[in-house]
Image: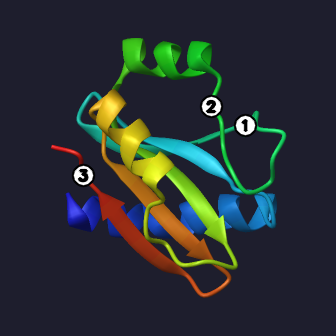
Amino acid sequence: MQESLNKLLPEIYSHMEKEAPREGCGLIVQKNDKIKFISVENKSEDENSFYIDPKEYVRHSIISKILYVVHSHYNQDCRPSEHDKNASKVLGIPYLIVSLPERGEYIYDPR
C-alpha cells in the first residue's frame, strides 16, 4: 500500500498546491484493483478547515472503496488536529494529511 501512496503523492501535492492557502481535500479510492486519488471540492467557508459534500462522499463510497480521506494543512505541520482524529474515528477511515509548503505526510489510522 505504501508504494501505491508514494506514486500518488505528486498528484496529491499538485492538487493541494492549487488550493493553497485553503486546505485542499480528496479521497484515495480503490476500484477494480486500481488505487487512485480523486480531488474533491472543499465546501468549507473557512480556509483552515475542509468539508467534503456528504453526497459526493457517499457517491464515491458506492462505486469504490475509500481507503483514505486526504487533506492539506497550510503553514502548519501535518499532524492531525483533534477534529481530524474525531472525524476519522467516526468514518472509520484513515486520514492522510499533507503539509505545505514544506511537503510532509502523516497518516492517522483510527483502527
What mark, if any, has residue 52 been given in the picture? 2
Q: CA distance from mark 1 to mark 3?
A: 23 Å
Disc 3 designates what residue? 109
Going by the picture, which residue comes out furthest to the front? Answer: 82
Q: Quadrant of the C terminus?
A: top left
Of badges 1 and 2, the one in the foreground is 2
Identify the residue at image location x=56%, y=54%.
Answer: 71
Residue 68, position as x, y percentages in the image: 37, 44
Disc 1 designates what residue? 41
Going by the picture, which residue comes out furthest to the left? Answer: 111
Taking the image as shown, residue 4 lies to the left or right of residue 62, namely: left
**Observer-nearest residue: 67 or 111?**
111
Identify the residue at image location x=38%, y=49%.
Answer: 85
Identify the residue at image location x=43%, y=73%.
Answer: 105
- Please state which amino acid type lies under the numbered disc 2: Ile
Q: CA distance from mark 1 to mark 2?
A: 7 Å
Residues at badges 1 and 3 in contact (C-beta under 8 Å)?
no
Q: Secondary structure at mark 1?
A: loop
Residue 21, position as x, y percentages in the image: 81, 66
Q: Dot 1, crowdedness within 10 Å: few (<14), some or many (≥20)?
A: some
Q: Secondary structure at mark 2?
A: loop
Q: Dot 2, crowdedness within 10 Å: few (<14), some or many (≥20)?
A: some
Earlier-in-chain disc, 1 versus 3: 1
Q: Dot 3, crowdedness within 10 Å: few (<14), some or many (≥20)?
A: some
Q: Secondary structure at mark 3?
A: loop
Q: CA distance from mark 3 to mark 2?
A: 19 Å
